[in-house]
Amino acid sequence: MTQPATEPVPGLFTLVLHTHLPWLAHHGRWPVGEEWLYQSWSAAYLPLVRVLRALAAEDRHRLLTLGVTPVVAAQLDDPYCLQGMHHWLANWQLRALEAATVRTSSGPSPASAPDALRTFGSREYREADRELAEFETLWRHGAAPVLRELIDGEVIELLGGPLAHPFQPLLNPRLREFALREGLADAGQRFAHTPAGIWAPECAYAPGMETGYAAAGVGHFMVDGPSLHGDTALGRPVAGSGVVAFGRDLQVSYRVWSPRSGYPGHSAYRDFHTYDHLTGLKPARVTGRNVPSDAKAPYDPDRADAAVDRHVADFVDTVRRRLVAETARIGRPAHVIAAFDTELFGHWWYEGPVWLERVLRALPAAGIRVGTLADAVAEGYVGAPVDLPPGSWGSGKDWQVWAGEQVADLVQLNSDVVDTALSTVDKALTQSASPGAPAPRDVVADQILRETLLTVSSDWPFMVSKDSAADYARYRAHLHAHATREICAALAAGRHEQARRLAEGWNRADGLFGSLDARRLPGA
């Protein structure tokens, strides 16, 4: 491995993180439900903010481009979720205390032996105590003021997205436009900044979508590398729109995280899948790819820390070599983008936040300029226009995960529910309007669209196609479809008071996006 260079490296490197979970509040706790939110919040979101604030205190700016979907932002600001997160952190602290005082083995794994578990529990207790204190002092009023400080200070660039993360190519154009415009407006209200760029859900694209992006004020968006045929060294305006598509560099991104390899699988890192059954903590290290859970070695933070340093050096070297090679290939300074799910850093890969902090220091020290997607646009890292093919960042880089035979029933469900919802909302708004006057706000129509957007969330077909909590995903899709149809049926039968009661009842569980206004739905 070559040593990091001190002379400037040509070009620009951008790290893009995509923060997304489906709406989980009021929809189960374990094994799938709110626990997923609280685990990601404690393991990834709190540490990421801690890293960014620490680097900002060193007068470092434009560190990364952070996508936060409206549905995640809604949960991180929701009073119910904030209370649940506080309880979850306190429970984590209690479980750590239990581990720190255990006297008998709680399982066959060496990591669950009393001495190993006590050592692990003491360390875990200190970590839980720190996060609980941070949450109480920084997060108790939600994520919006926390993230706004980072945006205002130009520490990050914010990417937005459509409400509830729909798979846009399969969505009715009217609802697609509504979801995107409302999503951008939601970010503007929360953060006092309307994003100029978006992370398109699942990086999904269909020809013509750039026209809708331009009309909504979106200037740039992410696609996966194969959509640009692997030529990701510059952003590319799509067709004649002027909207720039940036592609994820798979050669660099897969160095960290890939379907078969990457840093998180290293033997020294904490094992994500191995639990201590008494406390619910994860006290083992990976140990080896073929080592069963009951034989995993105890987690060793010093061993893991040394591995982090090696992987930081390897990543910096990979980025440096890629920038030099791509600059030589295109004959001008190149742009390299590594993009990941935010939840990788801490939730899936426990050491990820530490790696992230060190790599964001090491890249500039090695002469590599770090900037955001907005920086890339402003500084001209943009090439010739391109006609993008249909694509996504899913398996096969096409639409099969969200439109394949395995989820054909969900595709049909989505189509039917959207048709019902749009026709019902159109009729309701027409009937409520007085001649010559604008229609009044209709909370029943609002809730119909809210439940419809939750029905068409891209998470449900993804979880079915990947056989990851598929039963839960199908349940959630059909639950929100039922809510939509139930309210619509009451309206169609002229039972307006029943429709209002149903809408209010569903809103108690699904009250996100309080500013959603059905009157802004584009006309047929």
Image: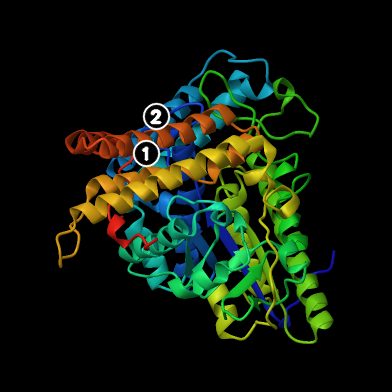
The mark closer to the camera, 1 or 2, is 1
Residue 251 percent across, percent down from the top left = 78, 61
Closer to the N terminus: mark 1 or mark 2? 2
Q: CA distance from mark 1 to mark 2?
A: 36 Å
- Looking at numbered disc 1 in the image, what kind of residue is underneath it? Thr
Q: Could you say which is closer to the camera, residue 169 or residue 125? A: 169
- Looking at numbered disc 2 in the image, what kind of residue is underneath it? Asn
Name the residue beneath numbered marker 2. 91
Residue 291 percent across, percent down from the top left = 78, 27
Identified at 70% across, 43% down, the residue is 303
Look at the picture and state if 85 lies above or below 307: above
Position of residue 243 in the picture relative to residue 483 (left or right): right
What is the secondary structure assignment of the residue under circle 1?
helix
Look at the picture and state if 14 lies above or below 430: below
Asked where in the image residue 324 lies, by quadrant, the reply is bottom right
What is the secondary structure assignment of the residue under circle 2?
helix
Q: Could you say which is closer to the camera, residue 8 or residue 120? A: 8
Q: Are marks 1 and 2 in contact (CB under 8 Å)?
A: no
Identified at 73% across, 42% down, the residue is 265
Residue 90 percent across, percent down from the top left = 37, 33
Name the residue beneath numbered marker 1. 484
